[in-house]
Amino acid sequence: MRVATQLAVCLILHCIIVPTTGFPHELFVVCQDDASLIRIDTRRETVTARVGVAPGPAMIAATRDGRALFITHPESGRITKLDTVDLGARQIFTPGGTPFGIAVDPVGRFVYVGDWKKNVVRKLDAGTGATLQETPVGREPAGLALDAKRARLYVANRESRSVSVIETGSMRAFAEIEVGDGPFALTLDATGERLFVANVRSGDISVVDTGNEAVLTRVRVGGSPYGVAVDRANSRILVTDQHGDKVSVIDADTLEVIRTIEVGRYPEAVLAIDGKGYVANWFSGDLSILDLATGRRIATLRLGEGPRSMAFTDATSGETR
Amino acid sequence: MLASPALAHGPTPIKVDESIVIAADPKAVWAVAGKFDGLANWHPDVVSVKARGGDATGAERQITLRKGGTLKEGLDEYDPSSFKYSYRMSDPNLDALPISSYSVTFTIKPAAGGGSEVQWYGRLYRGDTGNEPPDNLNDDAARTAMSEFLHAGLLGLKKKVEGK
């Protein structure tokens, strides 16, 4: 039945979908220019689905169980909600404005989305898309990072050189942390105690102690760092350098750059999964897969045009923050 | 409150990608085009370049265009061993170029049939980053302006290197 539904969707969307046995280890990549969503089985390093989405998709978030995906469309003020079991099953939310950065809580009850132009973060009902609350943040909110356990949301304010910290129950912004120039992407470590913020223009990473919202240090990486990820398996931080066509690997304990790895052209989004690094290269439209223990590039997969963001679903780990 | 032009950015980047084949080896092409402050020597649309910092990361240049107007750019990466450098716009000048932000890479590779392939490519954002830009500041205007600038430069470089 499921296969039949997917085949019907394929006929409409001119896509490919290979049926999979559940959805435990799947990486989803959003390509902005050809409005596509690509699913990758990270155990087999293969593309298992390519489907079209509404025009201009930018950022993506997934629930912990991997059942639901949320994708922003900043130029049309929309959000697409997809079911990962049946990629053709969709809802369109219309919060309006310029929705860009997005996060969803683990159980998929609330979605948080930044409005790039209106400088607010909205809390939406993830079932209906209704806007519940709106919180002013800094200018051009880019990446969002959610710590659901502590009910905290971190927002990179690209043009305010700062990160806003929001308590997600009340949606009160209770702190603003000064970081480097052009903060775009940010991510938390496994404990939620450290926040890593990639500053595109100052070419460095601000390391924040989330216990007291203090900046511990700034790690120089150079170029234009557009993405940051935590490699829990090796206690490393991965940073994409969009101008250098490389990934810098930072030791999470010493906070020093210990290695750089060449990838495709203009790398942007990055994730670390089970000791492997996945780097979406915006210009060359491909995915570099890295062995993080050796620093070797082990595979390159063709994506679509203009890959911007990625989400990983792992129903078995329960670690998604 | 509106973002000041110096900081305006946008959520949807645009790709530009130009290339040309030149009948000289990469080293010879790099000797002409590899200096960050040397653009006026080969780009027909550029009258002069004021620069500081040489070819070190963080160097800056101000380009004066033949049609009038100036562009300020900063050097992000410089790798002479692979004949490659990347730079980005420092301050937008929408009268000179309808682009609010850009980053660009110049590189030379050996061409398949001998000689060099010069690639000049980048990522940019339209002049008006709002969701309803006027025609002169939309995606097409930005893409066209930068593509034409890069293309004209590559033709000028080919002419200069090949001596024709």
Image: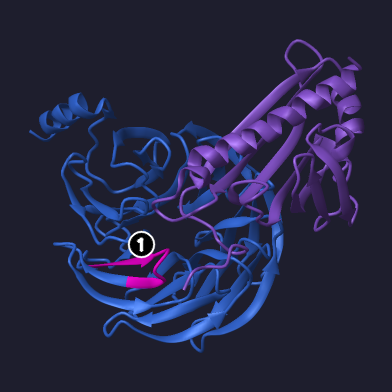
Chain colours: A blue, B purple
Residue B86 relative to residue A279: left or right: right
A148 or B107, nearer to the observer: B107
Q: Which residues are magenta?
A: A110-121
Q: Residue at x 65, y 44 (%)?
A: A245
- In the image, residue A170 above or below residue A199: below
SS for dot 1: strand
Percent of width and height locating residue A309: 43, 50
Percent of width and height locating residue B25: 87, 20
- In the image, residue A64 above or below residue A31: below
Work out which quarter of the rendered image holds the N terminus of chain A and state it. Answer: top left
Percent of width and height locating residue A22: 22, 43
Give yes or no for residue A119 being in the magenta stretch.
yes
Residue B155, by quadrant, is top right
Percent of width and height locating residue A74: 37, 54
Q: Residue furthest front?
A: B68
B148 or A163, nearer to the observer: B148
Q: Main secondary structure of the magenta part?
A: strand
Q: Residue at x 66, y 54 (%)?
A: B93
The amino acid marked with disc number 1 is Ile
Q: Residue furthest left?
A: A1
Work out which quarter of the rendered image holds the C terminus of chain A and state it. Answer: bottom left
B74 or A171, nearer to the observer: B74
Chain under numbered label 1:
A
- In the image, residue B92 above or below residue A26: below
Give yes or no for residue A21 being in the magenta stretch.
no
Q: Residue at x 76, y 51 (%)?
A: B70
Q: Which residue is mark 1?
A: A102
Q: Answer whether residue A266 is visible to the viewer in this image.
A: no
Q: Answer whether residue B17 is visible to the viewer in this image.
A: yes
Residue A250 relative to residue A152: left or right: right
Q: Residue at x 65, y 31 (%)?
A: B148
